[in-house]
Amino acid sequence: MAESVRQMSALMRKEFLLEWRQRYALNGMLLYIVGAVFVCYLSFNAKRGQLTPIVWNTLFWIILLFTAINAIAKSFVQERAGRQLYYYTLASPQQIILSKILYNTVLMLILSFLGFGVYAFVMGNPVNDVPLYLLTLLLGAIGFASSLTLVSGIASKAENPATLMAVLSFPIILPLLLMLLKVSKNALDGLDRSVSWSEIATVLAIDAIVVTLSWLLFPFLWRS
């Protein structure tokens, strides 16, 4: 167990080092968030507080969804076949997929909270229950990271990974996104938190199912 944790820590450290050496990718994602928020501000001529809460919420999740796709799509696509074979000799497939999911979850948490701060500053903050909204961002980051990481691993085996990534991710992300929109709308309206428990449980179930499927199915994908 200790050896497995040590190997996963080393794999996550490798991911952070690669991201730090290629800071243009991280800077590009941050620029994407800020640019998308600014374009929404200009397009809707939205002075602070003028957007209805449902439009405010929908725009934010659209920005976050495309940020997640851009940030996580490269998880396996950028890995060369020789490097993947080298990883195969060092660690188990389960450790590799879990380290990728954990790293992408941390990355999505940073981008989500930073994006929420920028979005709320520019477009105003109509959220009545901020802790519940932040919990929704946490669950969304886990769901996006686990789902898109697995899809990225599948798409990397195809000749046209970008197209396959878009096709496969949509049916997986859609039910998760619908639940997140519902919970975040409840947080916007300031409804009692007990109203959102069923949706939160559904999101947790989706996250758990995707992580479990990644654990079970990725070894077969890795051997191909």
Image: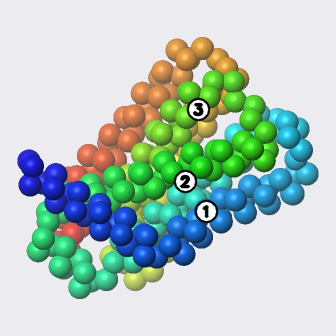
**Tag 2, which secondary structure?**
helix
Identify the mark at residue 67; answer none if there is no mark.
Answer: none
The amino acid marked with disc number 1 is Leu
Residue 213 position, x and y percent, is: 27, 50
Q: Which quadrant of the figure contains the C terminus? A: bottom left
2 or 3: mark nearer the eye: 2
Q: Element at badge 1? A: helix
- In this orientation, does residue 79 appear? yes
How many residues crowd mark 3 within 10 Å: few (<14), some (14–19), many (20+)? Answer: many
**Mark 1 and mark 3 in contact (Cβ < 8 Å)?**
no
**In the image, which disc is placed on residue 111?**
2
Disc ID at residue 30: 1
Mark seen at residue 133? 3
Is 69 placed above or below 2 here? below
**Residue 26 appears at what percent x and percent y?**
53, 67
Q: Residue at x 56, y 48 (%)?
A: 112
Contact, mark 2 vs mark 1 (Cβ under 8 Å): yes
Residue 175 locus on image (x, y percent): 51, 43
At label 3, the amino acid type is: Tyr
Judge whether 184 appears above or below 25 on screen. above
Q: Tag 3, which secondary structure?
A: helix
**Amino acid type indicated by mark 2:** Leu
